[in-house]
Amino acid sequence: MFPVKFHSFRGASILTLALLISACSTNKYAATEKIYKQKTKDFAAIISAAPPTGQLYDLANPTNQTWVGSVNFGIRKPNFVILHHTAQDSLAQTIKTFHSAKAATSAHYVISRDGKVVHMVNDYLRSNHAGVGKWGKDTDLNSSSIGIELDNNGTTDPWPDAQINSLVKLLETLKKTYNIPTANFIGHSDIAPKRKPDPNKFPWKKLALKGFGYWYDDVLLNPPVNFDGPNALKLMGYDTSDLNAAIVGFKRHFIQSDITPKLTPVDLLVLYNVYTKY
């Protein structure tokens, strides 16, 4: 009896060990998750330091400043959502890119063509998705926004219903959780029209009908004779320091059939209608 029990126990132990090894080996992102945990640990140490290190200003007499921690503070609250297309061929390829320290890019969420949502950066942390851009007076959109990448090569890919449905559900959660204004759901090409065309030919109207961004009405009223199109673009948020780029950014979002850097009479009708919603 004893030898049987001994061998049975040993076999179970070997099986358990094998299962544990198998479980570990199936997590192909274990190494990057370890880096993520270490970075959050390092940031936690910076935040919890009291007094904060490296934040006091230089004085000839250092005794003239002190630290008294307040009880009234919080953490970053995103105020924008910026949509992108990945310009890559698969979800796996995008995840690999966002795990590359050399690429140095990321997003809070990636949504695959089949609707799978991958959360990659905590909403309260700053993701490297927006780059150099401007919306209104905000010149650091990475610090004030949630970045969502949509698995799409940016040229011939369609926008599947499964992907858009998952996006809408995610946006519903983000809007409710962070009280993000309707106007603040925008595209990368809105904030960086000189650099980015994404998301390309995106169904913005579908999102606007759900309360994420604005769209123009079916019946358009003529703008007043003194309507200033460039100023309207600026008041909406576009960076008009390069007016042609701003016009292209607007037309990528709202016109799409024509993205030439010129405001046609039809463009002005659309612009006036959308502008009045802001």
Image (tube, rainbow, N blue to C red):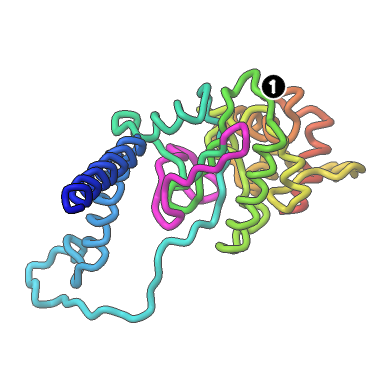
Q: Residue furthest top?
A: 156
The residue singled out by tag 1 in the image is: 260
Image check: 143 left or right of 195? left
Q: Quadrant of residue 59?
A: bottom left
Image point (62%, 38%), residue name: 115
Give 50 or 17, whichever is nearer the viewer.
17
Three-letter amino acid code of the residue under disc 1: Thr
Residue 29 rendering spot, x and y as whole percentages: 34, 38
Q: Magenta region, mostly helix, strand or loop?
A: loop
Per the rendered image, the range of residues in magenta is 112-138
Quick one: SS at disc 1?
loop
Residue 252 rendering spot, x and y as whole percentages: 67, 30
Give 259 or 232, whichever is nearer the viewer.
259
Residue 98 rendering spot, x and y as whole percentages: 39, 34
Q: Is residue 195 highlighted in magenta?
A: no
Q: Quadrant of residue 79?
A: bottom right
Image point (77%, 44%), residue name: 215
Residue 274 rendering spot, x and y as whole percentages: 76, 45
Q: Residue furthest front?
A: 1
Give 100 or 104, whichever is nearer the viewer.
100
Other-residue count near label 1 (Cα within 10 Å), few / some / many at <14 / 14–19 / ≥20 = some
Q: Is residue 5 visible?
A: yes
Image point (65%, 18%), residue name: 156
Image point (31%, 42%), residue name: 19
Q: How many numbered dots are placed on residues in this image?
A: 1
59 lies above or below 146: below
Q: Is residue 239 visible?
A: no
260 lies above or below 233: above
Q: Is residue 121 highlighted in magenta?
A: yes
